[in-house]
Amino acid sequence: MMASSRCHLFILLFICFSVAMGGSDYLKYKDPKQPLNVRINDLLSRMTLAEKIGQMSQIARENASYDVIKNYSIGSVLSGGGSVPAPKASAETWMNMITVMQKAALSTRLGIPMIYGIDAVHGHNNAYNATIFPHNIGLGAARDPALVKKIGAATALEVRATGIPYAFAPCVAVCRDPRWGRCYESYSEDPKVVEEMTEIIPGLQGDIPANSRKGVPFVAGQRNVAACAKHYVGDGGTYMGINENNTIISPHGLFSIHMPPYYDAIIKGISTVMVSYSSWNGEKMHANHYLVTKFLKGLLHFRGFVITDWEGLDRITSPPHANYSYSIQAGISAGIDMVMIPYAFKEFRDDLTYQVQNNIIPMSRIDDAVRRILRVKFTMGLFENPFPDPSLADQLGKKEHRELAREAVRKSLVLLKNGKSGDSPMLPLPKKTQKILIAGSHADNLGYQCGGWTISWQGLSGNNLTTGTTILNAIQSTVDAETEVIYSENPDSELISSNKFSYAIVVVGEHPYAETDGDNLNLTIPDPGSKVIQNVCSSIKCVVILISGRPLVVEPYIDEMDAFVAAWLPGTEGQGVADVLFGDYGFSGKLPRTWFRSVDQLPMNVGDPHYDPLFPFGFGLTTEPVHAN
C-alpha cells in the first residue's frame, strides 16, 4: 500500500511538473529570446479559425470599439483619409485612442496585439500640426534619394508620435498618363527614378541589417514604422489614366515599367504590399493569383503580408459587393493576407469561415496569411512594445522636420522658363524694390498648396486646416522691409494700371483632389487661373508659379510669362518657394515627367516614338544663389 502511495505521489509530482513546464511552454510565442519561426509556429498552433480570420481583418477606426476588437479578435485597425479621433486632435488624443484599442486586443485569449495603419503619404497627413512634405511628384523632381530617406525617417517619427506603427506608404506607381487622379502620388513616369525613390523605405522602417535574407520584412524599432509598397501592380498605366481601370500592356511592358520599384522595395525589407484596384489586361489585381502568389510571394520571395486596398475585395465584382462570397474566394485564393474591410467585417468573417469549413479555401491558405501577419508583428516588436510611446509626442511637426520639408520644397521646384527671348533672366528676383504684386488663387491658400490627402481625403481649401506657411507669407517675410507687397487674388485692370509694380508673382493651379475625383481628361488650369495669368502678365513683368499634381496645358500662355516655375504640391512649408525665388538658393529640380503640349498627345512618355513635348522629361533650368541680395 505504501509503495502504491509513493507511486501515486510520484505520478502526481510528474503531472505537476509537466503542467508547470507546459505553462512555461505556453508563453513561448511571448518570449523575445525564442527564434522568430518558433514564436510564429507556437502561436499559430494555438489559434482557432475564428482567431485566424480575426487577424486577417482590418476594420475602420469608427467601428473599432473595445468590444468589437475583443470579441472578433481583430488583428488590425485603420484610419481612412480624414478619419481622426477628434478635429485637430493632439498627439496625446491619438495615443489614448490607440491605447484603448490595444488593451482590447491584448485582453483576448491569446493577447495578440493589433496593428494600426494610416495613410501617411506626404508626411503624417491626417494629423493636425504635422509636417506636410511635397507630394511624391515633387520629390521625383528633386531627384535626391538621401533627402527622401530623411523624409521617410521624419515621417516615421511623426506617425509614431501619435502612437501609430504602420503607414500605407510609399506609393511606387509609375504614372504613365497625367490624366490619372493619383499621378501626384507617383514619383515619375520613369521606373528608374521611382526605383531610386524607394530609398524612403529604409527611412520609414530603418536600414535592413547587412546580409539579411531577401524579402524578409524589417522594422528597426519604436522610432520606425512598418511601410507598405502600393499599389501592386500597374496602377499608373490604366487606359486614359482612368483610376481603378484596366492596364493594357504586354508582360514585358508590365515587368519592365511597373514592376521594377517592387524589386527594390522587397530588397529593402518592405513589410507589406497593397494590391491595386486596377486590372491587368482585364483581370482584377485583387484576384490575380499569378502576380500575387506565384510572382510576388514565390519568385520574389516576399515574406511580409499582402493587404487589399479599401474594400478591395468588394470591387472584384462590378458593381462592387455584387457577389461577396465569390470576391472573398477569389481574393483570398489569389494570395491576399489582410483584408481592409472597414465595415463588412462580420459578413467577411462568416463567409470566410463557411468557405474554410467546406474546403472551398484550404486551411493552408489561411495559415500562410496569418503566418505572414504574425511575422510582421513579431519583427516590428509589437508583442514587446504594443503601446504608444508618450516620449515621442513632441516629434509631431517639430522644427527640424519643417526645415527638412522646406529643403525638399527648394529642391523640387522646376524652372521651365527664365526670361523672354532676348531678355536677361528674370529669376532670381530682387528682394529690394519699390512695389510688387502677388496674384492668384494659390498664393495664400495652405490647403491648395498641400493638395489631396491633407487633413481630409480630398484635401481642403483655406489656411486654418493645419499649421504652415503660405507662399504669400513666405514672400512677405523674405523681401526687404521697404518693399511694398500688394496681394490680390484676381486683380482687375484698374489695380494693375494704377500702380507701378516692379514685377508680379502669379500663383495659380489645381484645386485639391484625390483618386478618382482627380481624373481629368482636359488638364487645363482651373478658372480663373488662366485669366489672371493673361491679365497680369500682359501688363507687368511676371513669374508664374503653378501649383499642381501634374503638368497642365500652358502653351496658350507660356509666351506671356517672363518666367515659369512648376512647384507641384509643396505642402506646408511655402518658405521653400521664396528661398529659391529670391535667390537664397538656386533652382535645381528636373522634370520627373514629360510636359505635353496638348492632351491629344497623351499618353506620351520619354522614349516614345513621335516624342514632341513642350518640355522634355528631365528638363529644368538652373540658377545660382545670390549671396548679397
Image (cartoon, helix red, strand yellow):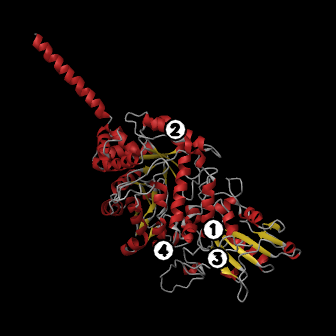
For numbered disc 2, what is the local secondary structure? helix
Crowd around label 2: few <14 · some 14–19 · many ≥20 (10 Å): some
Report how far apart the C-alphas of labels 3 and 4 lie in the structure.
Answer: 20 Å
As drawn, the label of residue 415 is 3
Q: Nearer the viewer, mark 2 or mark 1?
A: 1
Q: Which residue is mark 2?
A: 99
Crowd around label 3: few <14 · some 14–19 · many ≥20 (10 Å): many
Q: Quadrant of residue 488?
A: bottom right
Q: Which residue is mark 1?
A: 410
Report how far apart the C-alphas of labels 2 and 3 lie in the structure.
Answer: 47 Å
Crowd around label 1: few <14 · some 14–19 · many ≥20 (10 Å): many
Amino acid, disc 1: Arg
Residue 18 is situated, as x and y percent measured from the top left of the image, at 23, 27
Residue at screen point 81% across, 70% down = 491
Earlier-in-chain disc, 4 versus 2: 2
Q: Nearer the viewer, mark 1 or mark 3?
A: 1
Amino acid, disc 3: Leu
For numbered disc 4, what is the local secondary structure? loop
Q: Nearer the viewer, mark 4 or mark 1?
A: 1
For numbered disc 1, what is the local secondary structure? helix
Q: Quadrant of residue 454?
A: bottom right
Q: Quadrant of the C terminus?
A: bottom right
Q: Is residue 557 above or below residue 315?
A: below
Crowd around label 4: few <14 · some 14–19 · many ≥20 (10 Å): many
Earlier-in-chain disc, 2 versus 3: 2
